[in-house]
Image (cartoon, helix red, strand yellow):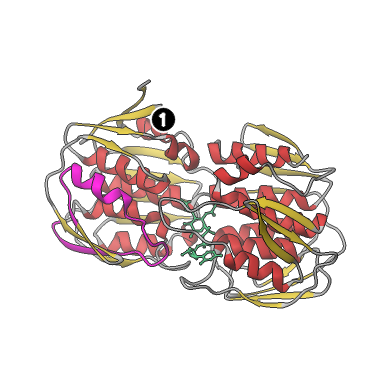
């Protein structure tokens, strides 16, 4: 199993190219199941989650070619039953439910399990497709959904923690081939939902309002092939911005959408980090004097839960008290115990982490637990004195394309070790 060895304390400098967004490309790949024609998707990051989704599409009968940042999918014929073990392993694969149901009128998709960041139910996904007329049951670990014809309906999709991103994606994909009009109220507004809608529209779908809480989908008879370029990964961009800030460096991010990063930019500026935007670039310079801040994670356009852990790795360096409140996922503080190992002073009270920043950090062997927690540990390792060894970094490869190579190019002393 690979681990990462980091010798911390080097300020990062230089330029970094941001990759395509993982959380946009996964539902877009699922959407290719909606047509027998060829779809071509560009700016696809080389990630294990993407290869995994490719294998899932193949297991459903699609022909998939992944080459140099482009994925080509031809789903001439599609089976409605996915490979149980493949699908079960990746939470994002639930978004094949909507397209299978839309095109095949039937879907058997293994129930995704919970994960370390919380229980992750799919009740809202099921509520959505039931409202369109699907019969849904859980049998032998599969979600089984069937509908001779899906019929458009008004669906309120708000849940306990607000809207659902993949639930909105799933319902949009089920509704594009349904009879009549579907409206989704309390839809997720994330840029990844908008990117999916843009792709579906290129395929011939009729969707209005994506990016707002109210989305209208007018069903069409068939969809055709399309070509699309995936949006830049706002979470990767935020992670690199924080890497510059945490190491006292200055870097320029290329190929970003600053308009997707308002909440992150605003919060970083509050800590004293200096940010300059210029069309698709973002220049990030460390704060002269880092200040503590309070932040609460929220659905888009609020501060993203997917950047919560990384921001914590910056706030442990800011002298004073910072409070991070996690409102999207129940137990997304797995990184806290490992940051404590490096010398950080953090206590958890309910949904909040109270950070007494400014303690000296020194490198240690630590363990990655999930994707964003792993990114946070890398950032902390980069700023800590001495050597940090991060084990179980396969989580990072799920969501960050060549993170170690990109950081090395910025001057970081980081190398991958095979510890087997
Ligand atoms: N929820 C329900 N019922 C549902 C669905 C969700 O109660 O049927 C709850 C969840 O438990 C959570 C909240 O609603 O409390 C929001 O979850 P959401 O459904 O929006 O999450 P998701 O769509 O499963 C995507 C991203 C996550 C990201 C969240 C929130 C992908 C593949 N995953 O998950 O990304 O954290 O939206 O923005 O798009 C990551 O990239 O590290 C990651 C975890």
Q: Which residues are magenta?
A: 319-346
Confirm whether the magenta stretch covers residue 33: no
Element at label 1: helix
Image: 51 above or below 250: above
Would residue 45 appear left or right of 344 to someone viewing this image?
A: right
Q: Residue at x 55, y 68 (%)?
A: 189
Q: Residue at x 77, y 74 (%)?
A: 152
Image: 122 above or below 337: below
Specify whether tag 1 is near ligand 1 (CB below 8 Å).
no
Q: Is residue 231 visible?
A: no
Q: Which x, y percent locates residue 308? A: 35, 57
Observer-nearest of 416 and 353: 353
User: Quadrant location of the C terminus?
Assistant: top left
Image: 194 above or below 252: below
Confirm whether the magenta stretch covers residue 325: yes
- Number of disc labels: 1
Q: Residue at x 63, y 61 (%)?
A: 169
> Would you name the residue on which mark 1 appears?
405
Would residue 360 appear left or right of 253 to someone viewing this image?
A: left
Would residue 157 appear left or right of 59 to someone viewing this image?
A: left
Q: Quadrant of residue 192?
A: bottom right
Q: Which x, y percent locates residue 393? A: 39, 35
Q: Which x, y percent locates residue 91? A: 55, 50
């Amino acid at each position: 199993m690979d681990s990462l060895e980091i010798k911390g304390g080097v300020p990062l400098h230089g330029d970094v190219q941001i990759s395509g967004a993982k959380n946009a490309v996964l539902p877009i790949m699922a959407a290719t199941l909606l047509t027998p024609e060829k779809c071509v998707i560009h700016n696809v990051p080389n990630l294990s989650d993407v290869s995994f989704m490719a294998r899932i599409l193949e297991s459903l009968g699609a022909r998939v070619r992944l080459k140099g940042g482009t994925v080509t999918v031809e789903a001439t014929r599609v089976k409605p039953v996915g490979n149980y073990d493949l699908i079960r392993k990746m939470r994002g694969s639930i978004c094949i439910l909507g397209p299978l149901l839309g095109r095949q009128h039937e879907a058997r998709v293994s129930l995704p399990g919970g994960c370390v960041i919380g229980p992750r139910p799919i009740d809202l996904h099921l509520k959505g497709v039931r409202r369109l007329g699907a019969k849904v049951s859980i049998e032998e670990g599969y979600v089984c959904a069937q509908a001779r014809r899906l019929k458009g309906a008004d669906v309120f999709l708000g849940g306990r923690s607000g809207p659902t991103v993949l639930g909105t994606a799933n319902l949009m994909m089920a509704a594009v081939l349904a009879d009549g009009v579907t409206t989704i109220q309390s839809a997720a507004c994330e840029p990844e939902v908008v990117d999916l809608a843009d792709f579906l529209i290129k395929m011939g779908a009729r969707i209005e309002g994506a990016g707002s809480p109210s989305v209208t989908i007018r069903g069409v008879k068939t969809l055709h092939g399309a070509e699309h370029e995936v949006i830049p990964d706002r979470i990767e961009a935020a992670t690199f911005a924080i890497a510059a800030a945490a190491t006292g460096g200055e870097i320029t991010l290329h190929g970003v959408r600053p308009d997707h990063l308002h909440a992150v930019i605003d919060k970083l500026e509050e800590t004293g980090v200096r940010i300059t935007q210029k069309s698709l670039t973002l220049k990030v310079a460390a704060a002269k004097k880092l200040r503590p801040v309070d932040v609460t994670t929220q659905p888009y356009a609020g501060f993203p839960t997917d950047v919560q852990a990384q921001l914590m790795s910056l706030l442990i360096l800011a002298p004073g008290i910072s409070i991070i409140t996690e409102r999207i996922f129940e137990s997304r503080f797995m990184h806290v115990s490992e940051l404590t190992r490096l010398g950080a002073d953090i206590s958890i009270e309910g949904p909040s982490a109270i950070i007494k920043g400014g303690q000296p950090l020194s490198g240690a062997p630590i363990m990655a637990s999930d994707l964003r927690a792993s990114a946070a540990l890398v950032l902390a390792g980069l700023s800590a004195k001495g050597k940090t060894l991060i084990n179980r970094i396969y989580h990072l490869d799920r969501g960050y394309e060549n993170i170690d190579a990109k950081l090395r190019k910025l001057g970081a002393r980081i190398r991958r070790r095979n510890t087997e």
